[in-house]
Image (cartoon, coloured by chain):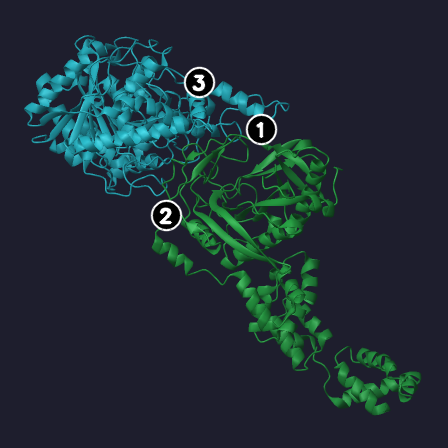
Chain colours: A green, B cyan
């Protein structure tokens, strides 16, 4: 898939990119948007279904009130106005993943509109205007089988799983984002990352991009520098990670720039992002379908009272950017140190660990190194590890008290993860406490000196760098259960 | 004919309660009548005698055990084939749903079964309730028991004919533009379109969601009220259903008193295009009502002249969307699935083969009306007319308690007469459509046989939303007075007279 690309620098020298981002957020309500079926990911296919979400003849939808509350809270936290009266609309098109062959969505009467978000990227502030946030239902999921790619092109047959049909979705649409220049891909990434944190703080969605509970369609067009008229845009789908958003937009900008610079024109179309680093054309927007929207006659209008809206406003958590600034100051981390925490999705874990008594630096160290490695090995999120922030704080407390050293602490964590109980229980069950009896330590030091006369001689000559070998021998002798610092002191005492 | 077949549901329920009659005996009589006459009338698409008898026996056992039973427990009913019921096919008169057995019951089916009513089977209808004659059924045309060469009305012609042929004392229908009232009118039976939202649409296959209204069909006003009471009420599964108490329609039917009631004739629903015999019987009925102490006036509802046009934009628009789901993917007919055709081609072939001409016509009109660039001119304008019609009703109801008109401009027309002229067919619903667009309630009650062709004429009563009880007060008063004048209810003419010889096994 080699298309002509201009270098990003050359593209930016000639063109200004304009972004438009459509983010779909799957809500984590207990039940679906219009029926009582469980709204969960990963069940056996077609088990969370009923006449309503299967669109059986005669069935009727009823709106999930919790989904409306979530939509309003999302709207409020994006600075949107909340409609006093709005309706659902039918978006008509035929596709086997749509059980009714129309999607119940909102059209010209969204529940939330006219919001704004401020983002800081490399010290520069960008304002993202939110056009609307509206409610809709997700479709089922098609599985194309019998081929190599898993895409429809070479499939022998397709299967449909309607578990996802009727999952509540909020679609958040920006107005065209101008003036980002070369930072366009980073701004897009920062925006989606902001939404992810916001949804998490609101506790309205699992926001797992890899499971599709947060999806971004990235629109971009180019204008020759100095122009103000928008160019023809492409909409890139299947962008399933923050990294991909940046990469896909960078690619599209370079591809469009090469087309335009070569005197060609951009086809207004949907494009598909491939993780290998390129996009391919999908459905052409020039032959776009006429969705024949009209107000959904099976549902009464949604008219949230102002009192309810204010009640919901009172439940909004601290905005993620405000919270981050507060914690960074309180913990005293440098910009990059703190960014690593956020990017690892460890902010809440570290906050809880600090709240349980651990110093911020220690909490950061455990979650971002040892625990991140284990999560990575197990292929799970940090939050999925079988250890709580309180337990991590307890491990650190053992280190601080000198009960265990860092190496032993890692074994304590092993024990906790293996379900052997609280850190203190693991220490006693596994016998992991360091030997703090100087008598035993001195005996071990003497044994090491005796066994390594050459090394001992060097240390006596003042070559302290050699002490490491003796410390290693002592630790080996004591199966690691010693405080290395104390061992060093004793070696100096005995040989000094 | 056995008097079990001609008796009203009210009488039958009294005899069942008194244990003078068993539900099994009554159900057997209905099944035998179906066996006797349905070959000619063709009211039913599906009859499940074993299931009906089992249900009847269960009611009898419960009654013997002294269990508390609903008023209509043990009374048989014919169900329009648009209500889902587990274990029985639901076709909506369409080939595209042939063989589909729904896995769930409509709310009304649940209510009917819980009341101990015995469902005999599913009745014929125009495909997806689109038509005024049952000629648009994908399976068969139902014949009018008064004259087998005539249409029984539509779309609920099967339910109305089952009543008039004495196959069942009660039936269920749905009324989107007149599908309960127009068949009632042309078969000499009673049909009620309740207030929109007063009866649940859950499990009733949708034609036009903002108009569809399930309702009772019966041979007497009181019977309709008894069934209305069973099926009405708020349903949390239908978001458009109204959470309000059901007016006491049974008491109203028993009250049957119009003294001092203000009854207004709608000027726009009469005159040119109305059969003289229909107008004659309508005017005589007005005299009867005046004689009972009602105050008869006239009102003008000028927007009603645009009702048919607005209806034929709004209804097809909703149809085009509601009928999209019949795409061969999940249930019903599938054509062309040969491993070569694409999904889209299979959808096209199936819909091409499965839908009849009228369904296709409405899908095409609706698709056009909703298209980008045409939406405002068609769907948007039609919705404005709908608002104007509601305002006309509001203004009229400021001066009158109920409005009246003929139910349909003519008596039953001949089978085949209008199949090639959709507009002539649509005009059968001229008088009934305004109440659907406004969402209020209306009833058709028989007012005699037209002197020019000897076929039944119906009078339509219209009342404000949630004032369904007024329909029953007026309908029952008129019914009583007319029966007194004739010496017997209208349908007795059919049960005992020469026109109904075929219903007594005289003609096979």
x and y percentages locating residue B353 in the rendered image? 50, 18
Horizontal side, residue B265 vs residue A158: left or right: left
**Which residue corresponds to the image point at 56% horizontal and 31% vertical from the top-left?**
A288
The residue identified by callout 1 is: A287
- Using the numbered discs, state the Cα–Cα distance from disc 1 to disc 2 in whole angstroms: 35 Å
x and y percentages locating residue A446 in the rendered image? 85, 88
Q: Which mark is residue B473?
A: none
Callout 1: chain = A
Asked whether residue B448 is in view, the answer is yes
x and y percentages locating residue B411 in the rendered image? 24, 13
Callout 3: chain = B
Q: Do pointers 3 and 1 mark residues of a single chain? A: no
Horizontal side, residue A227 vs residue B101: left or right: right
Q: How many marks?
A: 3
Q: Which mark is residue A84?
A: 2
Query: Quarter holding the C terminus of chain A?
Result: bottom right
Determine whether A149 is above or below B317 in the image: below
Q: Do pointers 2 and 3 mark residues of a single chain? A: no
**Which residue corresponds to the image point at 42% horizontal and 29% vertical from the top-left?**
B375
Determine whether A319 is above or below B85 in the image: below
x and y percentages locating residue B301 in the rendered image? 21, 26
- Using the numbered discs, state the Cα–Cα distance from disc 2 to disc 3 in whole angstroms: 43 Å
Query: Quarter holding the N terminus of chain A?
Result: top right
**Which residue corresponds to the image point at 71% horizontal and 33% vertical from the top-left?**
A263
The secondary element bearing badge 2 is classed as loop
Along the polypeptide, which appears first: circle 1 or circle 2?
A: 2
Asked whether residue A42 is in view, the answer is no
Callout 2: chain = A
The residue identified by callout 3 is: B356
The secondary element bearing badge 3 is classed as loop
């Amino acid at each position: 898939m080699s298309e002509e690309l201009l270098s990003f620098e050359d593209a930016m020298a000639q063109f200004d990119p304009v972004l438009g981002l459509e983010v779909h957020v799957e809500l984590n309500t207990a039940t679906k948007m219009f029926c009582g079926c469980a709204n969960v990911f990963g069940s056996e296919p077609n088990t969370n279904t009923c006449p309503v979400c299967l669109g059986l003849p005669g069935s009727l939808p009823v709106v999930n009130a919790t989904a409306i509350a979530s939509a309003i809270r999302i709207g409020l936290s994006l600075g949107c106005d909340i409609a006093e009266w709005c309706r659902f609309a039918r978006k008509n098109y035929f596709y086997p993943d749509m059980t009714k062959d129309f999607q119940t969505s909102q059209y010209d009467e969204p529940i939330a509109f006219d919001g704004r978000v401020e983002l800081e990227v490399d010290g520069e502030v960008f304002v993202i205007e939110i056009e609307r946030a509206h409610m809709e239902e997700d479709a089922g999921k098609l599985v194309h089988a019998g081929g190599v790619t898993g895409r429809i092109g070479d499939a022998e047959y397709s299967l449909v799983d309607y578990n996802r049909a009727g999952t509540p979705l909020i679609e958040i649409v920006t107005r065209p984002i101008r003036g980002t220049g070369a930072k366009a891909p980073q701004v897009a990434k920062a925006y989606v990352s902001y939404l992810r944190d916001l949804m998490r703080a609101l506790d309205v969605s699992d926001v797992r991009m890899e499971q599709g509970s947060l999806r971004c369609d990235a629109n971009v067009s180019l204008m020759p520098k100095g122009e103000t008229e928008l160019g023809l845009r492409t909409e890139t789908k299947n962008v399933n990670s923050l990294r991909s958003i940046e990469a896909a937009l960078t690619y599209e900008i370079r591809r469009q720039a090469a087309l335009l610079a070569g005197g060609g024109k951009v086809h207004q179309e949907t494009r598909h992002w491939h993780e290998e680093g390129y996009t391919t054309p999908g459905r052409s927007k020039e032959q776009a379908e006429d969705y024949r929207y009209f107000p959904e006659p099976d549902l009464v209008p949604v008219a949230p009272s102002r009192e309810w809206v204010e009640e919901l406003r009172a439940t909004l958590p601290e905005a993620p950017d405000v919270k981050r600034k507060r914690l960074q100051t309180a913990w005293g981390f440098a910009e990059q140190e703190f960014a690593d925490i956020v990017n690892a999705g460890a902010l809440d874990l570290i906050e809880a660990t600090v709240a349980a008594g651990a110093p911020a630096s220690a909490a950061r160290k455990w979650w971002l190194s040892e625990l991140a490695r284990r999560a990575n090995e197990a292929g799970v999120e940090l939050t999925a590890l079988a250890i709580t922030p309180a337990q991590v704080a307890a491990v650190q407390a053992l280190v601080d008290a000198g009960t265990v050293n860092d190496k032993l602490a890692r074994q304590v964590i092993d024990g906790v993860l293996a379900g052997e109980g609280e850190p203190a229980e693991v220490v006693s069950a596994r016998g992991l406490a360091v030997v703090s009896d100087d008598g035993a330590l001195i005996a071990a030091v003497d044994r090491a000196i005796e066994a390594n006369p050459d090394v001992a001689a060097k240390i006596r000559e003042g070559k302290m760098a050699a002490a490491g070998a003796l410390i290693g021998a002592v630790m080996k002798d004591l199966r690691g259960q010693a405080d290395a610092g104390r061992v060093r002191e004793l070696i100096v005492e005995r040989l000094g | 004919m056995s008097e079990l077949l001609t008796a009203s549901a009210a009488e039958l329920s009294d005899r069942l309660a008194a244990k003078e009659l068993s539900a099994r005996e009554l159900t057997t009589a209905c099944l035998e009548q179906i066996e006797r006459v349905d070959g000619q009338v063709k009211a039913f698409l599906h009859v499940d005698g074993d299931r009906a008898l089992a249900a009847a026996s269960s009611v009898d056992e419960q009654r013997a055990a002294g269990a508390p039973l609903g008023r209509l427990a043990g009374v048989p009913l014919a169900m329009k084939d648009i209500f889902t019921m587990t274990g029985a096919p639901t076709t909506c008169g369409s080939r595209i749903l042939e063989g589909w057995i729904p896995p769930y019951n409509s709310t009304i089916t649940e209510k009917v079964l819980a009341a101990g009513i015995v469902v005999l089977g599913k009745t014929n209808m125009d495909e997806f309730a689109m038509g005024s004659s049952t000629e648009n059924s994908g399976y068969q045309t139902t014949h009018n028991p008064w004259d087998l060469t005539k249409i029984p009305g539509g779309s609920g012609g099967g339910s109305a004919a089952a009543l008039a042929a004495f196959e069942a004392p009660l039936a269920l229908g749905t009324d989107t533009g007149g599908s309960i009232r127009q068949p009632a009118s042309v078969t000499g039976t009673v049909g009620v379109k309740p207030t929109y939202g007063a009866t649940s649409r859950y499990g009733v296959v949708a034609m036009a969601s903002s108009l569809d209204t399930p309702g009772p069909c019966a041979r007497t006003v009181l019977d309709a009220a008894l069934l209305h009471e069973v099926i009405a009420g708020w349903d949390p599964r239908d978001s458009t259903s109204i959470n309000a108490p059901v007016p006491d329609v049974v008491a109203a039917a028993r009250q049957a008193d119009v003294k001092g009631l203000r009854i207004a004739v709608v000027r726009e629903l009469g005159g040119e295009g109305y059969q003289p015999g229909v107008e004659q019987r309508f005017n005589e009925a007005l005299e009867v009502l005046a004689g009972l102490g009602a105050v008869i006036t006239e009102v003008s509802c000028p927007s009603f002249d645009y009702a048919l046009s607005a209806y034929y934009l709004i209804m097809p628009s909703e149809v085009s969307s509601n009928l999209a789901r019949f795409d061969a993917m999940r249930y019903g007919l599938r054509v062309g699935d040969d491993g070569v055709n694409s999904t889209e081609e299979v959808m096209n072939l199936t819909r091409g083969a499965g839908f009849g001409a009228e369904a296709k016509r409405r899908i095409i009109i609706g698709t056009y009306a909703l298209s980008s660039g045409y939406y405002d001119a068609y769907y948007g304008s039609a919705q404005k007319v709908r608002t104007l019609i509601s305002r006309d009703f509001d203004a009229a109801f400021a001066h009158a308690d109920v409005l009246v008109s003929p139910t349909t401009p003519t008596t039953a027309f001949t089978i085949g007469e209008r199949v090639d002229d959709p507009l002539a067919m649509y005009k059968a619903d001229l008088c009934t459509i305004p109440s659907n667009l406004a969402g209020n309630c209306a009833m058709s009650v028989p007012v005699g046989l037209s002197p020019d062709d000897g076929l039944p004429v119906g009078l339509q009563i219209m009342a404000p939303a949630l004032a369904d009880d007024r329909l029953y007060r007026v309908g029952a008063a008129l019914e009583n007075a007319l029966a007194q004048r004739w010496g017997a209810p209208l349908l007795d003419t059919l049960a005992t007279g020469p026109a109904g010889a075929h219903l007594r096994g005289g003609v096979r």
